[in-house]
Image (cartoon, coloured by chain):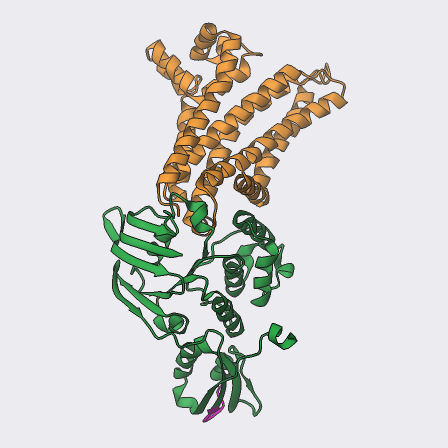
Chain colours: A orange, B green
Amino acid sequence: MRSFLLTAHTDILESLRAKWFLAYSLIFGSLVALLFVFGLTESRIMGFTGLSRLMVTYIQLAMAILPLFVLLTTVRSVAGDREAAVYEYLLSLPIGLAPWFWGKLAGRFLIVFLPVFLAMLGAVVWGVLKGADVPWALFTYYTGLLMALAWCFLGIGMLLSTLSRSADVAQASAFVIWLTLLLFLDLILLGVMIRDYLPPESAVAIALANPLQVFRTAAMLLLDRQLVMLGPSAYVILDAFGEVGYIAYALLYPTLLGTLCAVGGYLIFRRSDLP
Amino acid sequence: MICRLEKVVKRFQRQEVIKGIDLEITRGHRVALVGSNGAGKTTLIRCLLGEYKCQGGISVDGLDPRMHRREVLSKVGFVPQLPPPLRMPVGQLVSFAAGVCDVEPQRIEMVAERLGLDLGRFRRHPFVKLSGGQKQKLLISIALGRDTELLVLDEPAANLDPEARRIFFELLAERRDTAAMLISSHRLDEVAALVNRVIELDRGVVVLDDRVADLADLTSRLGCRLVLTRVDDAFGRAIRSWGFRTSDGGRTWEGVVPGPDRLRFLGMLSRYAALLASIGMDELPQPVPAEVRCA
């Protein structure tokens, strides 16, 4: 446990010093600030009306940015450290591979989740100060979704890092994976495929397997349950799952996928050459 | 402590880098692992540290270093050839290493102090921003600042100044009866005076495994006086880096050379052979340890 905590602590401190973390925090902080500015502009007639619309917009933007950031920074730092012989030295110290790997994952999870969460929390605090109604249920739900999304892509990032022998290959693979998942969103390639007579079962299976699509549907289902907003497969899925069922799926599936990828990454890490 | 390698083979894809090496290293052995670049020294060290998986058997005190990492590596101190580009501050590295090695950071700090590295001054400096010598001193401090039974040192003194090298040899001398040492170098003369056994690798096989006379005292010192035929600036710069001083403008130089460094020192002098009018080297009496003086 001591080694696990030391590794997590070290990884957190390393990330806090890194330039990517500064950029990452600034992006999410600025996003919330911009949404406030534009949100108020759009509601000029009625004034500040609440946080629901702001939060759903924020979560949509987070969906686009967070996975890419998590994937790229994780593979860059993990595979990059190995390439630069940092592992050769640090893993010559008496530390187990399990505390090392899972400690790194835990530290990194806190680092990627906290700025996104704190930006959203900042919006809530600001709303409270303004006397607006805070949608606490939505806030809690979105917190859970962000945790699941961050964990999912962190797991994928760790798996890619252990599979790739160089930081460049890991980074390119991460980008391709993100792009593929993005393309298979309901409103992009998947929508085109449905129009071109893709069997409905295949479209639903793809939509259910794509963590980005799962997250997008889950983020919108409480607010915009319209076909034009959700896309065809998500609409069908929601109809079959029901609201509660889909919420449970949206929280559990990305978490499970991230965990499976992380476990796979750990097993490969443990069995392969370390530096 | 017995470190045993049995028919160790390491392949990278189709290339066999280590080709069935058998070795046994026991306490008191100070082994020079020599060989040209690509001979397999670093690969062998990584196999020994459990960082590479390999065929054959490796055991340290009867334990497989890959299966029992913590137990094995807690007995092994390692100094790499190239310092890792760690961005973490020096203080954090010391805390991390002390934490995972379960020792007080003060022990590491004490060794660093002996080597002439003031950790208080550099605590907040990123490790990667230290000079080559400072990095080496810190890595040596981490390796020697705890109780180890096997020291694996990959060109450990390459970046050290002569005074730090002398202290380093003293530190090794303190461990000579309690630990085995594996000192890797691509040049035997760099490590010859430190060791009592030489293993030479060539393209992944052991081509020489020989015990050598264990005459050199790791703490011995040689008083040295050099007279030149003429004053030379380049020589002056080189000899000053060994801590030598001149009293007549650069014709005569006097200083102290650590005993284990004599070969390296003579190697340096050989570059200026045409300038040398006379060389005098005499072993100095051993300094009396502080505790004896107190008694």
Question: Can the viewer see residue B29 in this picture?
Answer: yes
**Along the line of sight, which residue is nearer the eye, A158 or A138?**
A158
> Relative to A247, is A35 above or below?
below
Is residue B229 found inside the magenta-colored segment of the image?
yes
Spot occupied by residue B172 in the image (x, y as percentages of width and height)? 48, 67
Which residue does the image show at 64% across and 29% down from the upper left? Answer: A119
Q: Is residue B247 left or right of residue A162?
A: right
Location of the N terminus of chain B by quadrant is bottom left
Q: In which quarter of the image is residue B31?
A: bottom left
Spot occupied by residue B162 in the image (x, y as percentages of width and height)? 50, 74
**Along the line of sight, which residue is nearer the eye, B161 or A186?**
B161
Which residue does the image show at 41% across and 48% down from the upper left? Answer: A83
Spot occupied by residue A108 in the image (x, y as percentages of width and height)? 53, 36
Spot occupied by residue B196 in the image (x, y as percentages of width and height)? 37, 70
Is residue B40 found inside the magenta-colored segment of the image?
no
* Numbered range of the magenta stretch: B227-233
> Relative to A52, is B270 above or below?
below
